[in-house]
Image: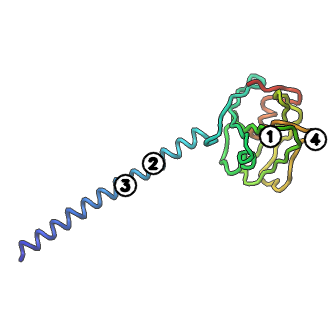
């Protein structure tokens, strides 16, 4: 009887040990996958958006292209932050006076209102998340809108009439 009890206890300890090892490996894998996922997200701020490089006043700018109604609607909402050399370019099918607001934004932006040749027609600076539900729109029809971090316009001496190169 004593021998059977020892064998039973040994089996229980072995099974518990194996279960613990499997659990710890599983936990570490989930933690590792989470860290890798966070790192990848940090490298690609814009998720599945096409990215393009624009240049203005010798400053390179990596922009995500919002060229569908779903992407237009979502924009930078919910994005934690973007770097000073990043932005989002909204490309529309036709000229219009498109409305923009700061719903679910986490940082301030400058908005540049552009024509089909990437010429800046108007600039709206320093829009803060707290301005929601205020709606911003250009005074004239545009076909592209570029959102950049607040301060980009001042820092890079961007002005109406300047043109972005692709």
**Residue carrying label 1:** 110
- Disc 2 residue crowd, few under 14, some 14–19, many 20+, Cα 10 Å: few
- Disc 4 residue crowd, few under 14, some 14–19, many 20+, Cα 10 Å: few
Marks 2 and 3 sit apart, C-alpha to C-alpha, by: 10 Å
**Residue carrying label 3:** 26
Left or right, 69 with respect to 26, comes to right
For residue 70, say whether it is visible: yes
**Residue carrying label 2:** 33
Q: Earlier in the sequence, mark 2 or mark 1?
A: 2
**Residue carrying label 4:** 139
Name the residue rendered at 58%, 42% in the picture.
42
Q: Earlier in the sequence, mark 2 or mark 3?
A: 3
Image quarter of the C terminus: top right
Task: Give the SS element for disc 4.
Answer: loop
Task: Give the SS element for disc 1.
Answer: strand
Q: Are marks 3 and 4 in contact (CB under 8 Å)?
A: no
Marks 1 and 4 sit apart, C-alpha to C-alpha, by: 16 Å
Task: Give the number of the mark in front: 1 or 4.
Answer: 4
Image quarter of the N terminus: bottom left
Q: How many marks?
A: 4
Most distant residue in the right direction: 139
Q: Nearer the viewer, residue 102 or 117?
A: 117
């Amino acid at each position: 009887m004593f021998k059977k009890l020892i064998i039973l206890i040994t089996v229980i300890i072995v099974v518990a040990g194996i279960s613990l090892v499997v659990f710890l490996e599983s936990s570490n894998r989930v933690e590792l996958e989470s860290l890798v996922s966070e790192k990848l997200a940090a490298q690609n701020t814009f998720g599945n958006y096409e990215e393009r490089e624009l240049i203005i006043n010798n400053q390179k700018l990596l922009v995500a292209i919002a060229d569908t109604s779903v992407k237009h609607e979502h924009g930078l909402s919910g994005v934690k932050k973007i770097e000073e050399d990043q932005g989002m370019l909204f490309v529309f099918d036709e000229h219009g006076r498109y409305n923009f607001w700061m719903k679910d934004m986490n940082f301030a932006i400058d908005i540049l209102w552009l024509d089909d040749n990437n010429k800046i027609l108007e600039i709206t600076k320093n829009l803060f998340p707290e301005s929601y539900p205020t709606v911003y729109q250009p005074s004239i029809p545009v076909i592209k809108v570029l959102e950049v971090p607040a301060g980009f316009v001042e820092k890079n001496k961007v002005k109406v009439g300047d043109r972005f190169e692709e």
